[in-house]
Amino acid sequence: MTALASTPDLDVMKRVNRQFVTGVTVVTAMDGDTPRGLAVNAFSSISLDPPTVMVCVQHTSSTHDCLFRADHLAINILSTGQLDVVGTFAAKSAGKFADLDWESGPFGSPLIARSSAQMEVRIRERLRASTHTVFVCRVVHAAVTELPPMVYSAGSFFDGGALTSLG
Amino acid sequence: MSEQAGFTFDPGKPVPVHLETGEDAATGDARVEDATDGGARSPAPVPRPRPFDGEGEEMPNTADARRERIETAWVRAWGKGDVDALDGLLSPAYLRHGTDPHPQGPDVLKAAIVSTRAAFPDLTTVIDDIVIEGDRAAIRWHSSGTHENAFLGVPPTKRRVDIGGATFARFDGDLIAEEHVTWDPRALLVALGIISLGQD
């Protein structure tokens, strides 16, 4: 195992991060009348009761600034059938929603069809942390399906329904 | 800057060079009061506050003069954006002690007022209390405004915010030499639920 000094080498940190397996979410919000969104794997549940979650969004994202105006956002947990969706939202393009099947949630945020699970949340705190903002959110709407979740590991996507159990 | 350049109703406004050259206090007081009254009222019936020369107890009208100087400068600086009005209130050596470990000089305060007013264009500030005792002044205030433009790097939230605070000032003669404040501009963001984590 590589030992670390007080400031780890960036390449080491990248390799460290690649050892952590996550799901894939698309965070969406309405910017006035325009839907916006980006692919995010920096999502975590904070507490179950009250249902509180967080997502981290880089300042340079085209969705970032509208999340300061919006009261709500949606977190779409992608399923194995949504490689096309993750491709769309990982890019910096306009018109990400043009060919997308989505509908408005109870509070207006875009909920993407075929997702494994969906939440709409009210944004509470916005924690500014150098390159990113952490959005701490209260869940106000949740829906879940049987569709297996997409898994992200070291830059590749995997089938969350076909994982091998360790025991 | 254009607002300052076009600021003309006030020919007698003291400028720092006057104050630094040891202009006497009574003249300084008169100038600020003239500026306050503009042409709207006759200055004649208003007794000129005179500073008390000696050590010890301040004369009551000195307290009134200080109160009025604070109100005038705050209204012009925070209310109208004429931050140079603070030159008639703050010593050139003024230091402001707040949440930042390094005290700030007058220019930093002026810049903070300008940027706050730019981000919250409808900002209104109300002085709730001014308590003067000896060479000290305690000022309690509250402000409201809408976060319309980027502020301290934070995108506009378009939300309205109400905050308040208190300032404790120490006069050295006619001018405030030092203030301890309970507020810094980040408090506006904290009131909006925006928290800046520790900076490197």
Image (spheres, rainbow, N blue to C red):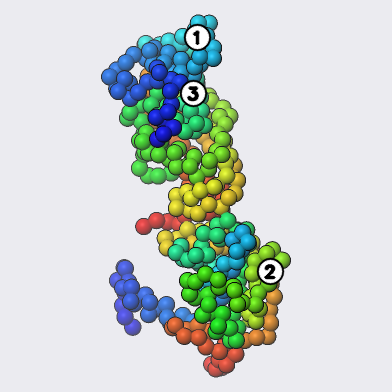
Give me the chain letter of mark 1: B
Depth order, front residue of A40/A114: A114
Q: Residue furthest top?
A: B44
Q: Residue at x 37, y 39 (%)?
A: B108
Circle 2 Cα neighbour tier, 10 Å, few/some/many (<14 / 14–19 / ≥20): some
> What's the chain of the residue with tag 2?
A
Q: Which residue is mark 2?
A: A104
**Toward the viewer: A63 or A148?**
A63
Instruction: Report x, y in % for residue A36.
Output: 57, 67
Q: Amino acid type of disc 2? A: Ser
**In the visual, does B29 lie left or right of A46?**
left
Per the image, label 1 sits on a secondary structure element best described as: loop
In this rendering, the label closer to the viewer, 1 or 2: 2
Q: Give the CA separation, mark 2 to mark 3.
A: 52 Å
Residue B115, percent across and down?
45, 42
Quadrant, the N terminus of chain A: bottom left
Tell me the tag on residue A72.
none
Q: Which chain does the residue under circle 3 lie in?
A: B
Q: Is residue B152 above or below residue A154?
A: above
- The picture quadrant where one finds residue A52 is bottom right
Is tag 3's residue or tag 1's residue first in the polypeptide sequence? 1
The mark total stands at 3
Which secondary structure, mark 3? helix
Q: Position of residue A47 (x, y in %)?
A: 61, 68
Marks 1 and 2, how far apart at CA: 65 Å
Q: Does residue A144 appear in the picture of this structure?
A: yes
Specify the label residue B72 is tagged with.
3
Q: Nearer the viewer, mark 3 or mark 1?
A: 1
Q: Whole-percent x and y of residue B22?
A: 29, 17
- Residue B43, numbered label: 1
Q: Give the residue type that dot 3 points to.
A: Thr
